[in-house]
Amino acid sequence: SYVLTQPPSVSVAPGKTARITCGGNNIGSKSVHWYQQKPGQAPVLVIYYDSDRPSGIPERFSGSNSGNTATLTISRVEAGDEADYYCQVWDSSSDHPNWVFGGGTKLTVL
Amino acid sequence: EVQLVESGGGLVQPGGSLRLSCAASGFTVSSNYMSWVRQAPGKGLEWVSVIYSGGSTYYADSVKGRFTISRDNSKNTLYLQMNSLRAEDTAVYYCARSVAVAGPFDYWGQGTLVTVSS
């Protein structure tokens, strides 16, 4: 089955840029979606189809996807961005379709 | 306004059964791809099951043969029947919507907690 690998944690100072990676075999050939989850809350979509941003999500959030790595970039990080972030793809390579999540990355704002 | 409201969670003994519901408003369940996603305490997200707009259903290997996803179009509600529950099924269960098979989960419910314990 398809595996997505994320770093468990990323730390960044306020105002700086955070980059959260999501590794997968030839992930550049798939559509990657990113979710933000704060404690006790449901996940919220922040980036879809690699780099599109839903309405209401700040322009500080951006995404890219190429080769074996997709990246979520958060510019000018704010305290309110502290959360867990998950990447996700749809995989049809096995005998049945799968919706695969990365293990999640905890973003800490120093 | 799109809204998803789960219910039906609770404490159940190992081997027991539970049925979760997800009431939708602001869109038609049967016209979308509806999934259940779960999150064990302190762990990450795990996709559980999906029902396509055309009615096809798929399951994660961890629940295949024990869980059944369904919908009631007249009530615009999604269900997850969970049988032969195990301790490792303990999690918050979310329902989520996609408008395309490879599309994102653009709307999520607030989740309902299922605890499997004796």
Image (cartoon, coloured by chain):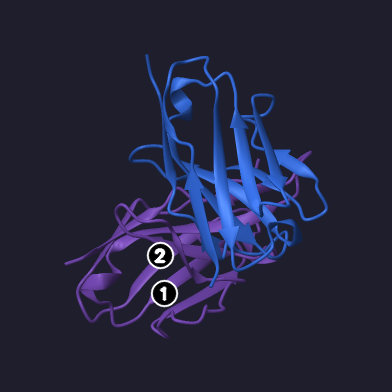
Residue A9: horizontal and vertical position, in percent?
Answer: 31, 55
| Relative height, residue A58 to residue B84 (above, below) | below
Q: Name the foreground residue: B41 vs B67.
A: B67
Q: Are marks 1 and 2 in contact (CB under 8 Å)?
A: yes
Residue B5: horizontal and vertical position, in percent?
Answer: 49, 53
The residue depicted at 75 percent of the width and 47 percent of the height is A93
Q: Indicate the chain coloured blue by its letter.
A: B
Residue B41: horizontal and vertical position, in percent?
Answer: 35, 37
Disc 1 element: strand
| Relative height, residue A80 to residue A86 (above, below) | below
Horizontal arrangement in the rendering, residue B39 relative to residue A32 (left or right): left
- Distance of mark 1 from mark 2, alpha carbons? 6 Å
Residue B111: horizontal and vertical position, in percent?
Answer: 44, 48
Q: Name the foreground residue: B18 vs B116.
A: B18
Residue annotated with mark 2 = A20
Dot label at residue A73: 1
- Along the polypeptide, which appears first: circle 1 or circle 2? 2
Q: Name the foreground residue: B36 vs B70.
A: B70
Q: Assign the C terminus of chain A to one quadrant of the image.
A: bottom left
Type of residue at label 2? Ile
Q: Assign the N terminus of chain A to one quadrant of the image.
A: top right
- Color of chain A here? purple
Disc 2 element: strand
The residue depicted at 38 percent of the width and 19 percent of the height is B117
Q: Residues within 10 Å of mark 1 (few under 14, many from 20)?
A: some
| Relative height, residue B34 to residue A21 (above, below) | above
